[in-house]
Structure formats: structure tokens, C-alpha cells
Image: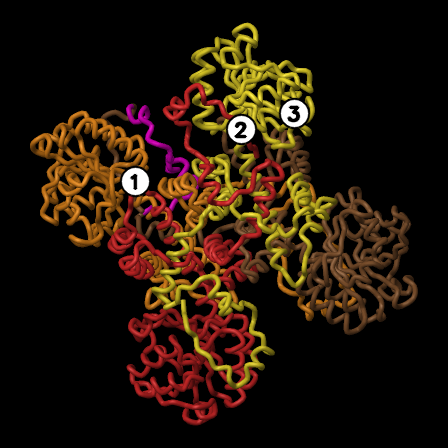
Chain colours: A brown, B orange, C red, D yellow
Amino acid sequence: MGMIGLGKMGGNMVRRLLLGGHRIVGLDRDAGVVADLAAQGMEGADSTADLLARLGEPGTRAVWMMVPAGPVTQSVLEDLASQMAPGDIIIDGGNSNFKDTMRRAEELRARGIHYVDVGTSGGVWGLQEGYAMMVGGDEAAVERLRPLLETLAPAADRGWGRMGPSGSGHYVKMVHNGIEYGMMQAYAEGFELMKAKTEFALDMAQIAELWRHGSVIRSWLLDLTAEALQSDTELSGVSDYVADSGEGRWTIIDSTEQGVPTPVITLATQMRFRSQQELSYAGQMLSVMRRAFGGHAIKTVEAHREEGLIPDINPADTSAAEQLGETGQQRVKDSE
Amino acid sequence: MGMIGLGKMGGNMVRRLLLGGHRIVGLDRDAGVVADLAAQGMEGADSTADLLARLGEPGTRAVWMMVPAGPVTQSVLEDLASQMAPGDIIIDGGNSNFKDTMRRAEELRARGIHYVDVGTSGGVWGLQEGYAMMVGGDEAAVERLRPLLETLAPAADRGWGRMGPSGSGHYVKMVHNGIEYGMMQAYAEGFELMKAKTEFALDMAQIAELWRHGSVIRSWLLDLTAEALQSDTELSGVSDYVADSGEGRWTIIDSTEQGVPTPVITLATQMRFRSQQELSYAGQMLSVMRRAFGGHAIKTVEAHREEGLIPDINPADTSAAEQLGETGQQRVKDSE
Amino acid sequence: MGMIGLGKMGGNMVRRLLLGGHRIVGLDRDAGVVADLAAQGMEGADSTADLLARLGEPGTRAVWMMVPAGPVTQSVLEDLASQMAPGDIIIDGGNSNFKDTMRRAEELRARGIHYVDVGTSGGVWGLQEGYAMMVGGDEAAVERLRPLLETLAPAADRGWGRMGPSGSGHYVKMVHNGIEYGMMQAYAEGFELMKAKTEFALDMAQIAELWRHGSVIRSWLLDLTAEALQSDTELSGVSDYVADSGEGRWTIIDSTEQGVPTPVITLATQMRFRSQQELSYAGQMLSVMRRAFGGHAIKTVEAHREEGLIPDINPADTSAAEQLGETGQQRVKDSE
Amino acid sequence: MGMIGLGKMGGNMVRRLLLGGHRIVGLDRDAGVVADLAAQGMEGADSTADLLARLGEPGTRAVWMMVPAGPVTQSVLEDLASQMAPGDIIIDGGNSNFKDTMRRAEELRARGIHYVDVGTSGGVWGLQEGYAMMVGGDEAAVERLRPLLETLAPAADRGWGRMGPSGSGHYVKMVHNGIEYGMMQAYAEGFELMKAKTEFALDMAQIAELWRHGSVIRSWLLDLTAEALQSDTELSGVSDYVADSGEGRWTIIDSTEQGVPTPVITLATQMRFRSQQELSYAGQMLSVMRRAFGGHAIKTVEAHREEGLIPDINPADTSAAEQLGETGQQRVKDSE
């Protein structure tokens, strides 16, 4: 099989395939990466034409693209398709939008080329633990890829499967990522809440480690989180900017188009959007509105904290009131 | 009637009552404020005892507290109650928690003192337009206050009403504020979205003003917003920190105790919490998790923007892909 | 001007234009509707060709479409455009997606036809109160429509405006509807919460009416709500199914594509999705999960209520505990 | 050690302790349960006094309560405490509110009795796999319980830990359950979305099983879900009513009191509230509002589906439009 795109993901997949005894021809615009993998047993190619020539008879070839979704995938695909023959297989292992995949599969079908989409999960751990692969495409084409998929997966019969027709592999991977966002946000909220509970002086690293054993919420994400917290509980210097990939957004869009309520997945993604804002215009609008109807002064966080305007929402504390004594008269300044 | 607390709210209410021909005795720890209102016709008092002495026969007196909820209200209340007699009325016009109000009413009932809660809305505009007042307490006591309430309200028969027993006035006001948060957030989100749509170069002030006339979403909040935007569309220099009062929080707590879903009111309040954070520990946790499973580098907002890593979520742009040409091969760096 | 689509919206707009002294030629597939409006002064047409013939010189004509967004708009548009000439104007007053509008405007521009989008708000009250109209399109074309827009709006200089280029009118209207969803949900949540507070026996109609006067949350939606509640406080027999229009969904999609957090608008729309479900597969999944890890029996609502399994979340009530006495020993059956 | 409450949780914990070689004296109001465990090596008691008498010297005894939170826990606790001596330990292994626990610990401290809270996770699987236990209380008291905790946990040094002072164990368990709700909802939303995607005819059981191997979202909850789906993919007959325990609600309340945004945990819990409603008053209100401003008829789900009013939110389908041909004229009936 050919592999185009030998980055962190593609490179590791090639390594796992080589360890599994497969012959792989690889192509990447970075010759150094190609040379590095060639030293591990991969056959290097220096162009698409060269790659295809090394893969044997037209109609029996398979090329796996492991390149960024969007224009790069489209470009590589067009370049490949223009040089391939009926019966050949192109695999998109990236995070493409399932709608793009469906469209591409239909275009290639007219030319007799099989298009297989493989939603791939596992991250940097896939080399060692295997990749979960959600596959979409014609049954016959998927069957031809079976030996490769069985090697890439955690075990021959586990962690991969044909979901359905073209696009379904990317679709299931998209939902997978949406769920991932929701889970991550659930953990993050819980840890933030516990961190804020300063009266208990809780140890985040200890809790994450404890929960890994016997709790209902144990998971692989928690395993990694616990490990990360061991080395840095305070997260000092870590940015709270949280990037998001297209797949979380597509999940929201798909759920909206389908009319299915997905509040948790959606909010998890929107909180990432919020983290990406330097200044929230919505927040500014709210400040302006509060000033307009309540005469609330517009303050900064620091000013609020210094003046102790963070509301005391607990029931009236009689003892505190007693200390105020007869001088307790103050005035309601603002009203909503 | 006596009024304790002559701040922005209490002072304006006294002014409206004086204009309505009522005799008001006022008390505030700031003698200057008392003197100022005295010049407008109010009778000033210099202590609780003095205030009560000026209000006539024990058992017929009514004192309105317009002081901050919490310990101050508790303190003023205890001071007052210790000097009042059966048949007297104490009114809490502040934003007290309805549970506190129910408890206080029960304690005072044992001593024969009526306790009336008045949830008051209208902000700085109340002097001119009248206050919406949601009243809780014994029917007879509320009836005795009718002349005052009819003057404070926008009209004698509109904008005030007895909601039910003690606590219900503050309860309805609490929900009022919860709704207010939801409405404000809805507007703010809409304006933020339109502001971000730079290709249309929309004019926020123009839109707010347009919507005031004939649209389904016209409202008093929009009137004020439109006015505020006229003078400052860009909101330059306005903080995006949004304070919250206890009542929004209590609404969430009450809905949680009742098991009633209130996603919009809750999220509106939580987005204010988010605006109050300087650094989000949850966001930091998410960054750490992403690094742990995907090898994602932890970046700052600036770094992300410079590198253009904000995801391109639209369908593959073929023309862009074509420009990439044969050099289009890149690699998937990260995976989730 | 010509008007195609004389339904509830289009018909009322024609009436308002006729009252304003404009000459209107109308077309609808329902001859009865045409006849009815003809009796009020409209000039009826029986085909697109007839309509256009009655509108004067090619290049000076304007036709307003008031038909459903989607295929109907596309069909009417194609029919119209094929018979129109450079310089003519087509107006889409429906709730089209702004992306469709931008595409259509570009196609028509190539043929010299102006395309103006008018997002229209006001519902059934527009005839009497005027319509809020958000207009997108070329400045010159919009200027030619000024006399019509000034008549349709609540006043000549209020309630309408050119937002920007083609698509911007529908875009602003889309956001308007998103905000509307958020506001409506905020009110609905508040009323539901108060309705559930049975100990206060609150009167929803009284509260809605009170809030109209002097409160911060007074609005036109509240005016209508108060009126509706006067006649039916209990809402007995009213379905809790809440339909949604495309525009709420598009707002979510646009905010997702832009990466702008809109939690309130989104949740308001998703709660409508939830109301449209007869049986929630997500809810079923959760029941199954709870059984799997906690041994929780899967119950129906009725069973839960009969058995009193709704959790008692308040702090331990000592007096209740005392009544249980020595027979208080029970067992924790389930655990999460 | 003594154990009071031998239900599903308490009984299994006794079994695990017996297997670990501990001597346990058990008490339950159901004599059959006591007899059953006695046959497995437990020593049965028939009253609190009897239980305490069998536990050795006053001041060295420890009794673990595994009874429902709330009044039952309070009642059992009072009964126990009245018969115990300084130096004795009472353990609350149930799901009590941490505020109750803090109050109780303080009351018992005055009497010299140690109060230890153990938040316990693991459900019906704990017997076999061990329990995750989050412990709060005095260090010395917790240390005395170490042998028991090491047996109950998945391993002597894993799955349990002292979090901090009294209340902290229940607090961390509370947050644990909040996170659990968020995770469960994330999965449930994802599966619902995929189920709705009928064009792909996806197999939920296959996907759940696949994701267990190599995916980023693998977890113990997913393990159980996959197993449950194997036997019943369609979930036919399963109610979509989702009960909730107090701890999810307390997490919302605590986050609200702390001002920490927890949208995912909160929404997960609120969607359970929604599932518990037979008829949503909020939904009814929205229907009434829509009728009031838009003339929208109030319909049932069935009526909507029959009439095909579910909005078509995708871009205009030209081919569909072409089929409509010249008869395409319809009218905009409603407007928002």
C-alpha cells in the first residue's frame, strides 16, 4: 500500500504496518521524513507517479492519504485520481467532513475508483496501542484493506469495522470527537469546581489517580489526565485557550440539521469558542445594558474583587449581621 | 411611612412618594443624603428610635427597608424589630432570598409584627416611570400599604400586586431577574454574532434602533440598548466582565431543587461566571488533556491566530486546492 | 409593484400598501385570495407574464416574493427571472437562508437584475402596527423601493433600513429570530418555574400583566403573553410541542461556523428539538447505562412518582428523621 | 467493624470485607438479609446495642452506615451516637450532602466521636472489582480504618484516599457523580445522533464495541454500554425517563454558589429533569406565544409530522424547485 503524508499520524501508522510485516511505499514533501522511515523499512517515493509505479498493477493499488482535511486533501486526491485506474482504492484517513467524502466518493465511483473513508482515533498512542478505525465504503474495497486494518487496529478483530457506505466512517468519527469534547469538558468542569473549593484544599492529582481505580468514571482520558497532573498539578503557565477541530463543529451542525438536541456536546464546543476570545463583545454588551437600566458602573474584574462586590448568595448570616450592629444601615445602590 | 436606606433606589422611591403627597420619614447613615432629601420634603430621622417616634402610634407604623440583602438587612431588621410593637409592619424592598424572607416573616409573626416583602424592579428609571412591585405577605398588611404602592407603581392599578404569602414577592422578583439574564444574554449573543460577520459590515446601533419598531423582539431592554449604542457602537474600552446579583444564582438553585429544567436562565448566568474568570482552570485542564492524547502543543491565542490554526470548517474549497497544486502534500499533525 | 404570494403575510402587506396609496398587482395560485384583495383595491394577475405586463416598462419593474423559503422561492424566482429584464428588481421577503440569497443575487447580477432581500418581522400584527424590515442589496435598488418600505414600516423613518449587501437583510432577520427564541425560552422557563412553586399558588396571568408595567423585562412578547394568559391561565389542552423555523437552526450553524458562543440561542432551539421527540433515544441510552453500572431498575415516570423516588435533595430534616425512630434502618440500594 | 444497612451496596461490601479476612458485625432491619450474610461468615446483630456490644471496647469501635442519605442517615446516626463513646468512629458511606456531613462531624466532635465520610463509587461491580472510595475526616481516624479501606478498594494502594477534612469525601464523590452525568449525556447524545442518521443505517452495538478498543473515548461506562447494547440494540420498550440522584443537583448548587461555570454537568442534569416531565408547561407557554404573535396554529407532534412542517433547513434544492414548476406559488403563512 502507498501512504501519502508521513507526519505524526501517518508516520506512526507506517511504523505499525511495517512492524506487522506489510510492504509500504511512502510519500511526503519532506524528504527527511521519507528517509527516516525508509531506514525503518519503508520504501520511499519521490512523486505521486513514482509511488503509483511502485504499487503494482493498475486496478489493484491502494493509496492511503493522511493529510489535513480541506484543500490539501482535495488537492492530493485530484492529483492521485488523475493517475489512477478503475479498481484502484483511495483511502482518506484524515478528518474530512463526511459530506465532502460522500461527494468525492460519488465522483470517483463514476471513474471506477473506490473511495474508502477511515475515521481514525488514537492519537500519539496509536503506534503502541493500535488505532480505532471507523471505515466507510464499498464492502469489497473494505475487504481488500482488511489485512492493513487488522494490523493498524489494537487487535485483528477489535477496534475497526465497516460502518456503512462512503462517508459513514468519517461521520462516526465526527460524532466520536463530539462525544470526546463533552467528556473532556465534564472532567474539566469537575476539576475546576474542586479546585475552587479551597476550604478542602483538595489535591487534583490524587483525585484523578484515585478515580482511575474502581470508579464509575474511569476512562482512558482520565488515565492520561492523571498522568499529566502528576507532573504539574498547578498547571502553572498553561494557557486556558482551547483549540477545536472541525469535527466538533460539524457535530453541532449535523445535530442542528437533524433536529436532535445535543446540549452537552454543543456547550463543550462553545466553551472552547469562548476560551478563544480575547475580549467578548457579548460581555461588553451586557455591561452596557446593565449600566443603562440599573446605573451599574462598568467595572473590571480587579475592581470588583477589591470592592468585594462578588455577591454573597448564602442565607443571611446572623452573626455577621450582629457584628454590624447599629451602624449596619447601608443602601441598595443598584437594582435589576 | 419610614424609609431606611436612602441610596439610589431608596432615595428615588422617597422622591416619588413625596411627589405623590405622602409623608415620609427617612433614615440613612449618611447625614448628607438625609439632608438632601429633607430639602425635598422628607422628614429626616437620626436613629431608628427617632424614626419610630415620628411615625405615630405603635401598632400602626410601617417601615420600609431599602438596604442590601444579607447581613445588612438582617441587622437593620433586628434593630427595628426590637423597637416595634405588635401590629407594626416592616417591609423588605431589597433583593433578599425568599427563604430568608419566609424565615424572618415567621419569626416576626410570633411577635405580632407583619413582614411584607416587595420585589422591586425598575432601576434608575423607576423615579420617572414607576416601579414594578411584586408583593408578598398577609393580605391585611398589604392592604394597609396600598396607597404607597399605588404611588410607587407606574399607575395606581398597574405594576404592583400581591403575589401570595410572605416570600412570594421576593420569589417572583427572583424569577424576574433570572428571565432578565436570559433575555440580556440572547440579545448579547445576537449582537456578538452580527459583529463577527465582518463581510456584511453591519451597524449595531442601526439594527438595535430598527428592531425597536415593529419587530417581534422589541422590548424596554432593547430601547435602552439602542440608546446606549447610539453613543458608543464600538464599545471601545468597555470591560467584558459581567457582574451577577444573587437572584440569578438563586433562580438556578431553586430550579435545581424543584427539578425544573432552566437551560437558558442557567447558561446566561454561567456565562457571567465565565466572564468573571481571569484564567479558567477548566480551560487549562483541557489544554493539558489535548496534549496528553494528541500531542497537541499548548498554545496561546496569539500563537493560534498567527499560525492560522483556527479550523477551516467549510467544505473543501476546490479552487484553493488547485492552487496548492502538486506541492499540496502535507501531513496530519494531530489527531483526536 | 407586484406581489407574488398573498397568504397571511403577503396579503396583509398588500393591504397596508393599498392603505398607503400604492398601486399593487398581486398573484397567488388561489384565485379566491386574489379576488378578495382585488375587492380591496389590488389589481389581480393570473400569471407571471400577466403580472409583469401590468407593471410597466421592463427595467423599471419590481416584484416582491412572499412565498415559503426553499424550493418554492427558488421555483418562483426562476420563473420570474426568465421573464424579467435588466434593471428590474426582485425582492425576497421570505425567510430564505442568507447563503441562498447571496448565491441568487450573484446569479441575477450577471443578468442585470437586482435582487433585494427583506427580512420581515411583525407577524399577524404587521398590518396594523407596521413591519420591521431588514433590507439587503444594492443601494440604488433599495432606494427605488423606499416609498414601499416607508409605508410597510411602522413609520416612514423607523423600522426599516438597509443593512448592507445582498444577504445581509436575511442574515439580520435570522439573528433576530435566534434572539427571539432565546427570549421566549427565558420567559417560558421562568413561568414554568413559578408554576411549579405550588406553595405560593402564584397566578401566571397576574404576574405577566404586572411585569408589563415598570419592570425591566417588559416587552412586546410579554404583552402578547399576558393577553394570551388572561383567557387561559392553565393552558389546559395546549400541546407542549414547539415547532421551529429554519432561521433558529441557521443561527446555530452560523455561530458554529464563526466560532462564536451562543449558548442561550442554541439551547432555546435545542429545547424545541427535545419537545418534538416522542421518545428520546438518548434518554433510553441513559436508562440502560444506569442499569448497567448501578443495577438501577428501569422505570416509567409513573412508577417513579408512585414510589417517591424523586430525590429529596434538601439537607437532612431532623424532625423527619426522629419520626423514623429506631426502625429507620434502610439500605442503600443503588449507587452511582 | 460494624455495618448498618446490608442492601445491595452494604451487603456486597461486607462480602468483600469477609473475603479479605475481616471480622464484620452486621445489622439490617431485614432479618433474612442478616441471616444470608451470616451464612457467609458475617456476625449478625439484632439491634444497635447488640451490634455495639459485639464490637469490643468503647473508644475503639467503628460502625459503617450504608443507608440512604437524608432522614434515614440522620436517624441511624442519632441512634448510634447516643450509644457510642469518645474515641469511637462512625462512617457514613452513603451519598450524603457534604454540608450535612460537615455539620454532623462538628456535632460529634463535641462528643469526642470521630465522623468519617466515605464517598463510594463502583456500583454493583464493586464486590468483584473493588470500590473507589473518597474519604474525609481526621487523619488519625482514617488511619485506623486503613485495613478496611485497603480491602474494599481495588488494591491496597489504589482507589482510595483521604481527600481532606470531614465532608471532603462526600464532596469529591458529589463532583464525581456530576462528571458521570456529563459523560453519560455525551455518549447518549452521540448515539442518538447516529441513530437518527438513518441513511447510514449504523449499528449502535457495533460502534460501542469498536470504540472500546483504541479510541480516545474508551471508558468503563462505554464497556458497560457496549455490553448492554449487545443484547438490545433497539432499546425497544425502554423508558426514556432518566432518574437523577441528589448529587447531580448538589453539584449544580455548589457550582452556582461558587460562581464556577459548569454548563455540561448542569445541562446533563437538566436534560434528566426534562425527561421526568410528562407535559412541559414551558413548552405550552411557547406554543401560546407563537400563536399570539405569529398566528401559528397550536399543533401536536403527530399533526406536524403528517403535514411535513418540520423545517427544510438545507439550501434550496433546485431540482426540487424545478419539479414544482409553474404551480410553485405558495404563500408564507406564518412569520416570526
Residue pictured at 76% horizontal, 68% vertical: B325
Camera-side mark, 3 or 1: 3
Going by the numbered disc 1, the residue's amino acid type is Asn
Res. C325 mark: none
Q: CA distance from mark 2 to mark 1?
A: 40 Å
How many numbered marks does the figure carry?
3
Camera-side mark, 2 or 1: 2
Res. D153 mark: 3
Q: Which residues are magenta?
A: A296-322
Label 3 close to label 1 by CB (< 8 Å): no
The secondary element bearing badge 3 is classed as loop
Q: Chain of mark 1?
A: B
Around disc 3, counting alpha carbons within 10 Å, would you say few (fewer than 14), some (14 to 19), or many (20 or more)? many
Q: Position of residue A178 (x, y in %)?
A: 62, 51
**Membership of A2 in magenta stretch:** no
Label 2 close to label 1 by CB (< 8 Å): no
Whether residue D164 is visible here, answered yes or no, is: no
Around disc 2, counting alpha carbons within 10 Å, would you say few (fewer than 14), some (14 to 19), or many (20 or more)? many
> Which residue does the numbered mark 2 point to in the structure image?
C332
> Which residue does the numbered mark 1 point to in the structure image?
B95
Q: Chain of mark 2?
A: C
- Quadrant of residue B64 in the image? top left
Asked if residue A204 lies left or right of residue D218, the reply is left
Asked if residue A308 lies left or right of residue A1, the reply is left
- Quadrant of residue D155 in the image? top right
Whether residue A147 is visible here, answered yes or no, is: yes
Going by the numbered disc 3, the residue's amino acid type is Ala
Instruction: In this rendered view, identify the residue nearer to me: B50 or A227.
Output: A227
Q: Residue furthest top?
A: D57
